Structures are given as structure tokens and as C-alpha cells.
Amino acid sequence: MFIFVLLLLAQVLVLNHVHLFGFATPLPYVYMVLLFRRGYPKWAILLLCFLMGLGIDVFSDTPGVTMASMTFLGLLQPYLLSMFIQRDVDDTLAPSFSTLGTAKFVYYTIISVTIYCFVFFTLEAFNFFNWQLWLATIGGSIVLTVILVLVLENLRKK
């Protein structure tokens, strides 16, 4: 919970104002969804993702967009995680570099962040009149967010 509060403050106070090249925005709070352990109840993941998204929406200018996107990612998270672990692994497995391995964790992060950014920026734009900007925003934000999540995971590991 402490990590989420720090990420929320960083997002609201600093990162919401960062638009690299005019369109790429880092969204590091997605990292919290990636950390749910394997046996965590699905209803609890959905509820916590909903509340985390609501917390970001309250302090940002995205009414309901983050909440819907986080809830959707929370819905998919157990299935995405199961793609990268073996079936006979303990239910208390928490995703990290050490438990999944670096390559699997990076792929897990890329897929999750891609889904999140696609849903988030599609709901935010709500039209496809300027689809080049939409794609650039999604692509740039994916790159920045993945890099930031991997840096956070590396710092957490130490």
C-alpha cells in the first residue's frame, strides 16, 4: 500500500505533467497490478484495481478512464500471470525478476502495460480522427512505462 501511495503522489505531482515529445506519458502505477501474487482472490484484485484507479482519477483529469482501465487490467492479470508460470507452482508466488526470471517478467510487463495503455488511451481519446497521435501516444507511453516499471522492480529487488 505504501508503494501505491508513493506512485500515486509521483503520478499526480510530477508524471502527469511529463509528456515526452508531446505525447508519451509514463504511468508507473500499473506496476501495482503486476505485483499481485498467483493465488490472490480475483474479486480482491478487481476491487483493489478499481480503488487504485479511482484514486488516480480523483487527483488527475481522467474521470473514470483510469478506473476502467485498471479494473480491466485487474480482470486479466491472473490469466496473464498464468501464461508465464508453471501450473505446479505455489499459490503464493509473487511476480518478480527472481521468481519468474528476467525475460519472463519483462514479457509479462510488456504485455500488461500494452493492454493497459491501449485501453486507457482509447477511452481517453474516444475517437479515431487523429489515429497517428493516438498510436504515438500509446507507443511512447508503453515504452516509458515499461522502462519505469523495470527500474522500479530492479530497485525493489535490492
Image (cartoon, rainbow, N blue to C red):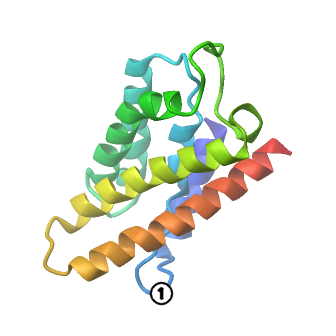
Residue 32 falls in image quadrant: top right
Q: Which residue is found at the position 42% from the left and 51% from the top?
A: 56
Q: Where does residue 128 sit, x and y in percent of width and height?
A: 15, 72
Q: Which residue is painted at 47% across and 87% down in the image? A: 21
Q: Element type at marker 1?
A: loop
In the rendered image, which quarter is residue 136 located in? bottom left
The N terminus: image quadrant: top right
Q: Position of residue 109 (x, y in %)?
A: 55, 48
50 displayed left or right of 16: left
In the foreground, 111 or 11: 111
Residue closest to the far bottom: 21
137 relative to 47, above or below: below
Could you tell me residue 5's position as x and y percent? 59, 45
> In this picture, is 48 found above or below 43?
below
In the picture, measured across the screen, residue 43 lies left or right of residue 155, that is left
Residue 13 in view: no
Q: Is residue 100 visible?
A: yes
> Mark 1 — residue?
21
Quarter of the C terminus within the rendering: top right
Q: Is residue 99 left or right of residue 106?
A: right
**Residue at point 52% right, 18% down?**
40
Residue in view at x 43 percent, y 29 percent? 79
Relative to 46, does residue 7 appear above or below in the rendering? below
Given residues 104 and 1, the one toward you in this image is 104
Q: Is residue 49 above or below residue 13?
A: above
Q: Where does residue 125 sit, x and y in percent of width and height?
A: 22, 68
Q: Circle 1: is it few (<14), some (14-19), or many (20+) Cα within 10 Å? A: few
Q: Amino acid at mark 1?
A: Phe
